[in-house]
Structures are given as structure tokens and as C-alpha cells.
Amino acid sequence: MKKIIEIITANFPNGIRDDFIDTTKVLRIYSTNYADENISRELIAKAIHKNGILHGGRFYFISDSDSQNILRLIDEILEAHSIACYCAVYDKHADFFARRHIYSPDVLKKFLRETDTKNFYFDEFCSARRSTRLDYEVAKIITASEKSLSLDDLQKRLPYVPSEKISAVLSDTEKYLPTTDGRYIPLSALQFDTDEIDTAKRQIISAIDANGYAAPEDYGFSANFALNPELAEKDLRNVICEKFFAADFIKRGKRLFKRNDDDCAIRRGDSIQSLRKFIAEHDELSAAELFAFAKNFDSAPNVALDAAHERMIRVDKNLFVADSLISFDVGGVDEALSSFVQGKIISLRSVTSFTGFPSVAGYSWNLFMLESFLRKFSRRYVYDAPAANSANVGAIYPKSMKFADYLDVQVAVVVQENIPLEKSAVEKFLIAHGFRAKRIDKVTARIIARAQEISRQ
């Protein structure tokens, strides 16, 4: 057995199959090296199965000394870091593992699970502690920090976790919000001026009594914005509406309406939470299934899309998949986008070719997948839109640009492109280039008024 294993280790660095061809090669080498001994092909197959690590139809053999070196490296990593994903460990030490006949993260995982009893080996990562979870580790780091943290900050503290997995944790909008400079802050750290919120509630009721609904301009949160300067105003507005107004008002797009008896029943069923639970139960979900489920709770399509984007990636118009099933080359995608953005505001539809984009295993690039990438993973660019949609309507711009809301984005792009400040010209430009889906006179008037103010400055 020992001689057979030595032959396999020396002559099959890329693994061996237990078939007739490979066992015959071993038999031939054995007969050459040990001419006075006779062994059977069955004994070779037994040695392969007993001592090899099976992966992808091949058995891999690792010497005792190499095994000790591998386990020593893993111990060093887990003594310094709470969690280590196999893919990141393998990528950072690929040459080390290749010299020891390990050629993929899956083979590494299988070897560790079958060899090491000291540490704990889960499906995607390993740890020195049984109770380790990535979301717990991220929460622990952010909670201990006295300031908001960027994805790069977290990546430095979790060097053996791919950035897309950290981004997936941060995309949980029930726990974290992105700041205007691309960092993240836990919802528990937000501060609220409740007196101003009570005043806003009275203003909302007055507006609804007068117009049937309340728009953002009908009530103000200036004191709350001042308490949380790192957050975009639209994000803080959404948090306040969900936390303080959801029991009395229902949100449709940007407008608030009074809840009637049916709305209250829906609220008791908690439509958003039901949507989120439904989405979390799927690794793949069609848009048709999503919208059909949302109808049960009278949820608008944009509300369903927002909920889906929290936990999933839209890979095309008809399909969402779980974040964990897709891995992006974040730096490569951002670099490919730079040739389109060029430091300006562009529409999502302006990205007309994906030739220079890094490939994504199992999927083809399109505007829907690009939107999902921008929503969660991009380090350099922002996607913004009037509401979640299926028409590829929206804008892309560098994170260095700061806007209070999407209206200001439209004002800025109108000024940027020197569009004549006339109703027909502004509407034609914004709709034709995919910044808006339809004409809304009130919105167009406000865009023109703000653009005129900028032009006079």
C-alpha cells in the first residue's frame, strides 16, 4: 500500500482515476520498480479509494509532510482571523496548495474535513469556533467601531472573506444603511428627533385631508437629517416612514396615503416582512412569481422589486437569484464602467456593450444584472432611479457626487448636457435617454426651476 501511494503521489500530481487506464499505469511503474513483486489492479484501486480525496471524478493524494504543512497554515490563519472562506484561502495561497497537489477550493475543503478534527469546517468557510457566522462577525466589527465603515475597511479586517460575501451581509436593509460616501452604518446607531417627527405626522394628515395623499415636500425632516449627516436624505426618510408612520400610512412610491381597514389588515399581516420571508426561501425566483405573491398583499411592483433587490440579484428581466450564487470581479467591473461614466452622470441605458466586462460564471451581462451590481457591490459608482422598475430606467454616477434625491440627479444631468430649459426639451431628453419613464408636469417644472437657479449662480 505504501509503495502504491508513493508511486501515485510522485506520478499523478493532477489526480488519478480508479479506471483501467490509470491503474494500468500504476501497475506498470510498480512492476518496473519492484520486479520481484506481484500486485493486482484491485489492490491499486483499494489504495486509491482508501487514501485518496475524491473530487470531480479524480482522487488526490497528499503526503504526510504536506498534510502537516497545510494544517499548520490553516491554524495560523484561524488564530489570526475568526472566519476564512475556502475560496479566499485558496486564492491567497494558490502556489502553496498547488505544490501539495491541491488544485481547487473544493479539494481543499474536502481534505480539511477529512483530515482535521481541531477546527470547524462549514460549507463555505472554516473557523476555530463552532458558532461562527459571517453576519455575526460583520456586526461585531461595525458595533465595535466608533465610526461607520466602508467595504474596504471590513475587507481589511476579514481578509479571507470575498468582498461580495461581505456586501451581501451589508445589503440587509433591516440592519445596515449605506452612507453618502460609500460607508455603512447600523440602523441601531441612527438618532431621531421625535418632536419633529410628530410635527411631520400632523403635516402629513393635513396634506392627505387636502389632496388625498402627502408628498415629500409636504413635511420636513431637517432636524433628523442634521442628526444623521452621513445618510442620504432619501434613505433616512424611508427609515422614518417605516419606523414611525407605517401603522397609520401606506407608502406608494414617494407618496403617503391613510390606511383604511383593509390596509390595517394588510399591515397586521406585515406585507413587507411576508415578501422578504418569501424571497429568502428561494435561491431562484422568477419576476412573475414575485409579482404574483406581492399581489396577495396589494403591494405595488416597485415595492416587490425593492424587497427582491435586498437579498437577490436580478440576472435578467425574468429571473432573480440569491446573492450567494454569483461572484463579481468588483474592481474589474468598476474599471469597465469607467469608460462609459467618465466622471459624469449617465443613464443605465448608456451602457451599450459589455465586451470589456469580466465574465460572471453561469450568467451573461445585461442591464438588469448591471443594476443589481451597482446597487450592492460597486465601490466607485451609484445607481439611482425614480423607483425600482423593469424598464432599465435610472442613472449611474460616481460616488463622489452627492444628491439629496433623484430630482436633483435629473437637474444635474440637464445642466451637465446643456439641455434648453424648456418643458418639451427637458422631458424629451430625460425620457429618450432613460432617466425617466414618463412625463410628469409637476416634476418637470421643479427640474426646470432648480436648473435655472443653478444657471444663475
Image: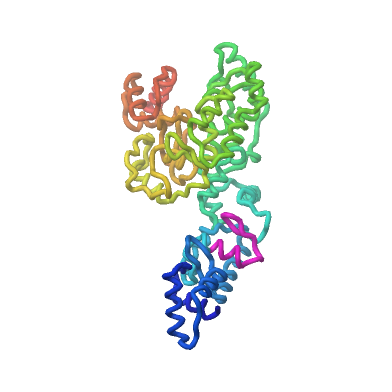
Does the stretch in magenta take in 430? no
Q: Nearer the viewer, residue 450 or 283?
A: 283
38 displayed left or right of 449: right
Residue 219 vs 68, above or below: the answer is above
Tell me residue 42's x, y (percent): 52, 73
Q: Which residue is painted at 56% across and 36% down in the image?
A: 279
Residue 320 seen in this snapshot: yes
Q: Which quadrant of the view contains residue 209?
A: top right
Q: Which of 371 and 424 is in front in this view?
A: 371
Q: Which of 89 and 109 is in front in this view?
A: 109
Given the current orientation, which residue lies at the most extreme bottom position?
36
Residue 399 seen in this snapshot: no
Does the stretch in magenta take in 113? yes
Instruction: Locate the N terminus and report the quarter of the image it occupies.
Output: bottom right
Where are the magenta residues, as a range? 108-126
Residue 138 vs 101, above or below: the answer is above
Q: Which quadrant of the view contains residue 294?
A: top right
369 displayed left or right of 311: left
Tell me residue 388's x, y (percent): 48, 30
Q: Which residue is painted at 58% across and 18% down in the image?
A: 257
Tell me residue 381's x, y (percent): 43, 42
Residue 108 vs 360, above or below: the answer is below
Tell me residue 141's x, y (percent): 62, 51
Residue 303 vs 218, above or below: the answer is below
